[in-house]
Image (cartoon, rainbow, N blue to C red):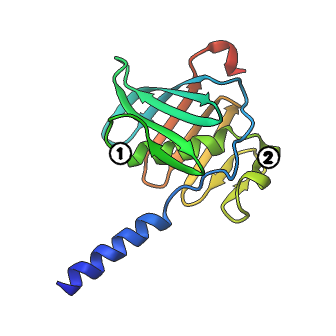
């Protein structure tokens, strides 16, 4: 019984350590909100296409993820530096991690030092970025980029409005 308890505690602590950090304040956005993005999730098993909407609702950021038919997959609100479930959808840990990584990727480069603690992020010479614990961002433009998670997941991000791709 003690071994099970210690194992459970260890797993819980390791899950907390590997959380993607959130900005200490709201970043400036590369395009006005609401922002609609196409998210293509690529794994070794399958490729999925999603639609993500970021909205500012009175200083609270709402992130909503939908499948191609418009069925909601995840809804989260960023309030007081933490994600909170929005609505009746079950918690979606992958979506929370993705939303956190997207906030980093969408943040203006000049703001990163004030948004994220030192040691959690890095901008490389080619303009790509890294975010703890295991995210890498490769840009084609401010709203056209790829996110790679250490778990082998890869996300292609592009704006739904082609005018914003540049």
Where does label 2 land, which residue?
Answer: 111
* Quadrant placement of the N terminus: bottom left
Q: Quadrant of residue 165?
A: top right
* Quadrant placement of the C terminus: top right
Query: Do we see residue 124 in this rendering?
Result: no
Q: Nearer the viewer, mark 2 or mark 1?
A: 1
Determine crowd level at label 2: few under 14, some 14-19, many 20+ residues with C-alpha closer than 10 A. few
**With 65 as the anchor, is 140 left or right in this view?**
right
Residue at image x 70%, y 65%? Answer: 119
Sequence-earlier tag: 2 or 1: 1
Q: Position of residue 25 (x, y in %)?
A: 70, 48
Query: Do we see residue 165 in this rendering?
Result: yes
Residue at image x 65%, y 35%? Answer: 59
Give whichever of 53, 101 is nearer the camera: 53
Residue at image x 41%, y 72%? Answer: 13
Tell me the SS state at disc 2.
helix
Question: Is the C-beta separation of discs 2 and 1 under 8 Å?
Answer: no
Where does label 1 land, which residue?
Answer: 91
**What is the CA distance from the residue labelled 2 to the residue labelled 1?**
30 Å
Determine crowd level at label 1: few under 14, some 14-19, many 20+ residues with C-alpha closer than 10 A. some
Q: Position of residue 26 (x, y in %)?
A: 69, 42
Q: Position of residue 99 (x, y in %)?
A: 52, 41
Q: Quadrant of residue 141?
A: top right
Q: Position of residue 48 (x, y in %)?
A: 37, 30
**With 110 as the anchor, is 38 left or right in this view?**
left
């Amino acid at each position: 019984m003690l071994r099970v308890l210690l194992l459970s505690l260890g797993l819980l602590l390791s899950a907390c350590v590997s959380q993607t950090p959130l900005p200490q304040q709201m970043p400036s956005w590369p395009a006005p909100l609401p922002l609609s993005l196409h998210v293509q999730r690529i794994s070794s098993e399958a490729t999925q296409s999603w639609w993500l909407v970021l909205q500012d609702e009175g200083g609270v950021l709402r992130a909503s993820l939908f499948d191609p038919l418009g069925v909601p997959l995840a809804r989260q609100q960023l309030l007081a530096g933490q994600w909170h479930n929005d609505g009746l959808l079950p918690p979606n840990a992958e979506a929370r991690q993705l939303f956190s990584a997207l906030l980093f990727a969408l943040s203006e480069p000049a703001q990163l030092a004030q948004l994220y603690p030192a040691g959690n992020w890095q901008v490389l010479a080619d303009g790509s970025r890294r975010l703890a614990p295991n995210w890498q961002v490769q840009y084609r433009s401010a709203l056209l980029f790829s996110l790679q998670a250490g778990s082998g997941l890869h996300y292609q991000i592009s704006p739904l409005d082609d005018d914003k791709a540049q």
